[in-house]
Amino acid sequence: MSTEFPATALPFDAEEILARLMRWAACESPTFDAAAVNRMMDLASRDFALLGARIDRIPGRMGLGDCVRARFAHPMGDDAPGICVMAHLDTVHPVGTLAKLPIRREGNRCYGPGIFDMKGGTVTSLEAMRQILAAGIRTKLPVTFLLTSDEEIGSPSTRDLIEAEAARSRYVLVPEPARPDGGVVTGRYAIARFNLRTTGRPSHAGSRLSEGRSAIREMAKQILAIEEMTTEDCTFSVGVIHGGQWVNCVTTTCEAEALSMAKRQEDLDAGVAKMLALRSTSNDVQFEVTRGVTRPVWEPDANGMALFERARRIANSIGFDINPQSSGGGSDGNFTGAMGVTTLDGLGVQGGMAHTLEEHVLIDSLVPRAKLMAGLLSTLD
């Protein structure tokens, strides 16, 4: 037993953690289905309320789901800067994915939609708090969990809430998935999203094809040009496209979404300028680019690295090691870290294949990651 981190010796049980995680993963919660996300928020709210947390339900906006803030009572009071565990409960998997990706256990793996990104880390964090409370350990700082509803689309409706809660906090802990080697995240790359739209001229594709100007054709040209702008400093990709309704009609409009990522803010800014400078390849077809949600670069700093070193000591006391990494992919840690709030990300479980029909967690990582979070929650001051 570690005398420095006694919470890591609490009786964590992988089967109990897994049982709750499987229930959470079975509650499908894709970002764009507000009712489904709210069902997940109901489930999480009940679990946190059973631990004695004060639950604040924050209504969603922009047609997206609600958020939940769970505060645990502390002698320092609600206004004292404390620890915010920042997690999202939306996933990329549409309702019905369970038919293709059922909750199932195979050896050391458990599969399910959103089980890795990031319900696994949220459940292990909940379990860490449950064990701390059951043992009568008093955290040195107040603890708040903020559960958001739209991280998978860049947090357009919750960024203000995230930043407001972070501004009231001394530390932000983000239980996004661990890195492949089990490491944690001390910085994240910048990410910008773009909405693309082409507008052509309709015609009958069978009898009057030459009179039309296809919006799909123009979008196809633009997609190739956009993705060919990728360099080692800044990447570009198009992941969504919608156009056309009838195959016998030359399409009037086509819409798409693009993503750009860079390790440095100046490289992303240059990439944004390139995107916004794109023009139509033909005078007969219009092409518009509008900037969407942007996640700023979060660069490692001294306070963040000091928090990492504490986490590493806790991990070592449990029996494993962690490395610090800057990472792509983006999370709400981009916002809090860029604000200068001491942030540590990637504290969730190990697993793989996020956002696919093979998404899974490694069961033997549940207890060590829960212990790591318990060590942080119980000793940060």
Image: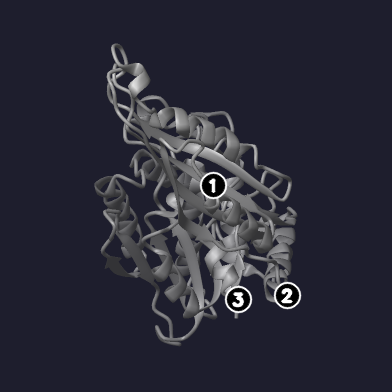
Query: Residue at position x 29%, y 57% from top?
Result: 62
Number of numbered discs overlaid on the protein picture? 3
Circles 2 and 1: CB atoms closer than 8 Å: no
Residue at 46% across / 58% down in the picture? 87
Q: Could you say which quadrant of the image residue 73 lies in?
A: bottom left
Query: Which callout, 2 or 1, points at the residue further toward the start of the chain?
Result: 1
What amino acid type should be assigned to the residue bearing mark 3? Gly
> Does residue 352 sit above or below 189 in this rendering?
above
Q: Which residue is mark 3?
A: 340
- Disc 1 versus disc 3: nearer the observer: 1
The residue closer to the viewer here, 151 or 205, is 205
- Residue 326: image x %, image y %? 69, 57
Q: Which residue is mark 1?
A: 278
The disc labelled 1 sits on which kind of residue? Answer: Leu
Secondary structure beneath label 3:
loop
Q: Considering the numbered disc 1 on the image, is that residue within a helix, a strand or a loop?
A: loop
| Of residues 360 and 190, the one drawn nearer to the viewer in this rendering | 190
Pointer 1 local density, CA inside 10 Å: few below 14, some 14–19, many at least 20: some
Q: Is residue 200 above or below residue 248?
A: below
- Please tell me which residue is depicted at 34% across the width and 69% down the height of the picture: 52
Residue at the spot 39% in from the left edge and 54% down from the top edge: 150
From the image, tell me which residue sits under label 2: 302
Question: Image quadrant of residue 225?
Answer: top right
> Toward the viewer: 341 or 52?
341
Determine which quarter of the picture holds residue 244. Answer: top left
Instruction: Check residue 111 in the rendering and tell me which mark sits there, or answer none.
Output: none
Q: Earlier in the sequence, mark 2 or mark 3?
A: 2
Cα gap from disc 1 to disc 3, whole angstroms:
34 Å
Three-letter amino acid code at the position of disc 2? Ala
- C-alpha separation, residue under disc 2 versus residue under disc 3: 10 Å
Quick one: label 2, few (<14), some, or many (20+) residues within 10 Å? Answer: few
Task: Pick the quarter of the image with the N terminus.
Answer: bottom right
